[in-house]
Amino acid sequence: MKTGYVLTTVDVPNCPPLAGPEFYEMLIQFALNLTVLLLVARFIYFRWNRRPEYLFTLLITGVVVFLICAMLRWIQLGMGLVLGLFAIFAIVRFRTINVPVKEMAYLFMVVGISSINALLRIGSCLQWIIFVNVFIVGLIFTVERIFFNHAINHRTINFNKTDLLKPSKHQQLLKELRELTELNITRFEIGKVDYVKNQAQIRIFFIGAGSEASLETENGNDDD
């Protein structure tokens, strides 16, 4: 008795023609999604955070997720596909860096809104698409405006007075850092400390742009 293996493919029963009505519907949805992405990434996120690498990430992620969902929405995958896409980001975790919590929230929002814009049909769900997009953009703008009204930048500096690292001297350390950098420092985080060499890495957070040449770009791995 002979046995054989049969290769199966995903059945897409109603794949529309390239120049059909659904194609132009998808173009309209893509334009809407790209507009929302630009509003969120360029005019809201970048205005308060000034981190071009994440601006690039948000735009590209949103476009790619939209295209994936738009191409596969004729297959009945539903929200399982959306959650699976975000699970990929959770596993990969952008191994080159540790993505901050705020940037991860933006990334999750971009994945969600792009999925909604791709999966919902304009013909039957236009009012919900507009409502969700306007609500999310308005919510993000309001939160940024209220809680992050001043642009916060940061950089990592080497500090050679380890005696000021004691919790009891943090106010004195903050004053010393402000005098040393002449920046409006709001807070700081103590990183690696070498008491033998009397050196410490301190990440300072300050209001304003500071010197563009000295702003830190996080391309290293912070897993150590």
Image (tube, rainbow, N blue to C red):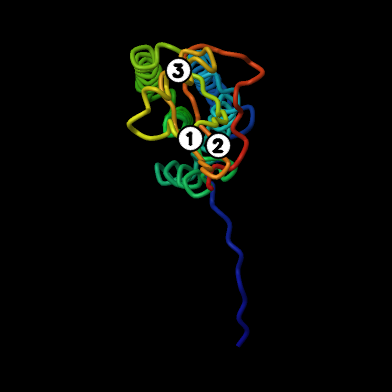
| Labels in figure, total | 3
SS state under label 1: helix
Q: Position of residue 20 (x, y in %)?
A: 59, 28
Give the amino acid type for the residue marked by disc 2 in the picture. Answer: Gln
Residue corresponding to mark 3: 185
Visible in this render: residue 159?
Answer: yes
Label 1 with label 2: CB-CB less than 8 Å: yes
Which is nearer the N-term, disc 3 or disc 1?
A: 1
Label 1 – label 2 distance at C-alpha? 6 Å
Residue corresponding to mark 2: 199
Residue 73 vs residue 48, the one in the foreground = 48
Residue corresponding to mark 1: 162
Q: Position of residue 182 (x, y in %)?
A: 53, 12
Which is nearer the N-term, disc 3 or disc 2?
A: 3
SS state under label 3: strand
Visible in this render: residue 108?
Answer: no
